[in-house]
Amino acid sequence: MRATLYYTLLRLLLFFAVAIILALFGVHGITLLVVALIISSIIALPLLSKLRDRMSRSLSSRVDRFQADLNAGTNAEDDD
């Protein structure tokens, strides 16, 4: 959960940083948002890749645990 929160906060920070820089260069309105989204996404790909991998592993393990608990509950109902 912490990895997901940290990754999301860094993505938002990166987006707002790019948006502020673009605004200083005179880009405004919907163009500012779209261009900032594209540029921040391109920057985040290599910059946050390790954190994204850690987040993915964390989410995958949580899903696996949930699925195991669900299967254990199903098996317990089948035994009754």
Image: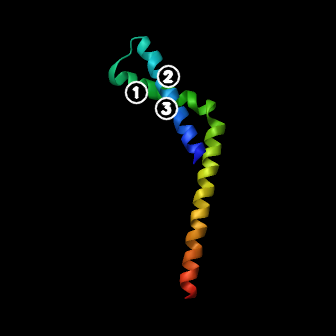
Eyeballing the image, is 72 above or below 11?
Answer: below
Q: Within 10 Å of the Cα at label 2, are there few (<14), some (14-19), or many (20+) other Cα atoms?
A: some
| Circle 3 residue | 12
Q: Position of residue 75 (x, y in %)?
A: 58, 80
Give amino acid for label 1.
Answer: Val
Q: CA distance from mark 2 to mark 3?
A: 8 Å
Specify the amino acid type for callout 3: Leu
Residue at image location 60% in from the left, 43% down from the top: 3
Please report the residue visible at 47 percent of the width from the left and 16 percent of the height from the top.
21
Q: Secondary structure at mark 3?
A: helix
Q: Quick one: SS at disc 1?
A: helix
Name the front one of labels 1 and 2.
2
- For the C terminus, the image quarter is bottom right
Q: For marks 1 and 2, give the CA distance.
A: 14 Å
Question: Dot 3: within a 10 Å radius of its alpha carbon, few (fewer than 14), some, or many (20 or more) residues?
Answer: some
Say whether marks 1 and 2 touch (CB < 8 Å): no
| Label at residue 34 | 1
Decide which of tag 1 and tag 3 comes sooner along the chain. Answer: 3
Residue 68 screen position, x and y as percent: 61, 68
User: Of the numbered discs in the image, which one, if any, rests on residue 17?
Assistant: 2
Residue type at the position of mark 2: Ala
* The quarter of the displayed image where residue 33 is located: top left
| Sequence-first tag of 2 and 3 | 3
Q: Quadrant of residue 47?
A: top right
Residue under the image location 57 percent in, 81 percent down: 76
